[in-house]
Image (tube, helix red, strand yellow):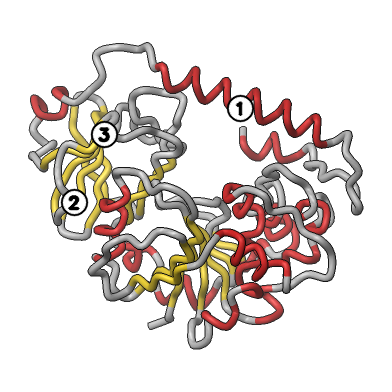
Amino acid sequence: MKKIAVIIPYFGRLKDDFPFFLQSVKNNPSIDVLFFTDNNFPCDCPNVKVYLMTFEEIVSQFQRNFDFKIRLSKPYKLCDFRPSYGEVFKQYLKGYDFWGYGDVDVIWGDLRKFLTDEILSKYNRIFGQGHLSFYRNLPDINAIYRYVVQPSYKQVFTFDYGCAFDEYYGTSRYWDINMNDLFYQVSHYDDVDCMNLAFRSHRRQGDNLLFSYENGKLFRIYLKQDNLVKEETMYVHFQKRKMEVNTNPADMFIMAPNAFLPYIDLMNEANYKLFQPNKTFYAQSYKLRYQDFCNKFHKLKACFNHCEFGIPTHPKDVLHYYK
């Protein structure tokens, strides 16, 4: 079995639903999660390794890997540095066949069911999104981010604001164009649209989704032609949603808009309909739109500042990809 480590630097207050993520990690005992954090959180997961450090210390660790002055003033900017984790954290990755990065606003299902030995033997890069991606742990693979041209890693690492360099705006596009046969991109997961109150996945296979966590397995449940459908999924990403906690993390629970709830059988149509939103107004979507507007304004301001390697610009074809 290929050994896998997921690297997660996290600085600042952890959300109330973080224990549910840990529960789903615990039920994937063959995958290690390496936390670099200033949070000394309680954890009984044998496959979770916590390295306590300050944000300033991890910035210094990144800086030691580059011969130019990087800009890493806020923890969120770490997302742009994710493709470099294989080099920056190489001393922690000895013995691992694959390393990855991911978010904590997710619930993992049975990852190994989808990360089969066949896939891990054939591909060098698995998935292209920031919420969970994997690279084969080899020096030449770990350095590929350095060959991306538009934008270049030097432009991104010296720019104050996020450029989504870990996704198709940067390294994933490079893989897609130059190493497509070694890049696995099949969506076995659900990336829930943060602009809708109801759960709507990027997969477009079923709206008004609910999710059921059952003894290490994760299921997506939806209504199709008046029939309830239950399918196993790899993981769900809640993407900026504020999830209420109305139960304890355990081996069984359900996820409905927008809460973790005690487990019940959602294949009962009455139970399924019980958790569907009865309103369309979603205040969080307006808050997110406002934040997005502010981020774009600050990025525009930053473009007028001197950038040693130039301003990072995204290729035009990325818009077509995301459509």
Instruction: Note whether 263 is above or below 59 in the view shown.
Output: above
**Mark 1 surroundings: few (<14), some (14-19) or many (≥20) residues within 10 A:** few
State the CA–CA distance, disc 1 to disc 2: 32 Å
Image quadrant holding the C terminus, namely: top right
Labels in figure, total? 3
SS state under label 1:
helix
The reply to whether discs 1 and 2 touch (Cβ–Cβ < 8 Å) is no
Which comes before the other along the chain, label 3 or label 1?
3
Residue 237: image quadrant is: top left
**Mark 2 surroundings: few (<14), some (14-19) or many (≥20) residues within 10 A:** some
Which residue is labeled 2 in the image? 249
Which three-letter amino acid code belongs to the residue tagged 1? Asp
Which three-letter amino acid code belongs to the residue tagged 3? Glu
Asked if residue 217 lies left or right of residue 181, the reply is left
State the CA–CA distance, disc 2 to disc 3: 12 Å
Which three-letter amino acid code belongs to the residue tagged 2? Pro
The reply to whether discs 2 and 3 touch (Cβ–Cβ < 8 Å) is no
Q: Position of residue 47 (x, y in %)?
A: 32, 74
Image disc number at residue 8: none
State the CA–CA distance, disc 3 to disc 1: 23 Å
Q: Nearer the viewer, residue 226 or 259?
A: 259
Q: Nearer the viewer, residue 269 or 17?
A: 17
**Mark 3 surroundings: few (<14), some (14-19) or many (≥20) residues within 10 A:** some
Which residue is labeled 1 in the image? 292
Instruction: Note whether 297 is above or below 80 in the view shown.
Output: above
Which residue is labeled 3 in the image? 244
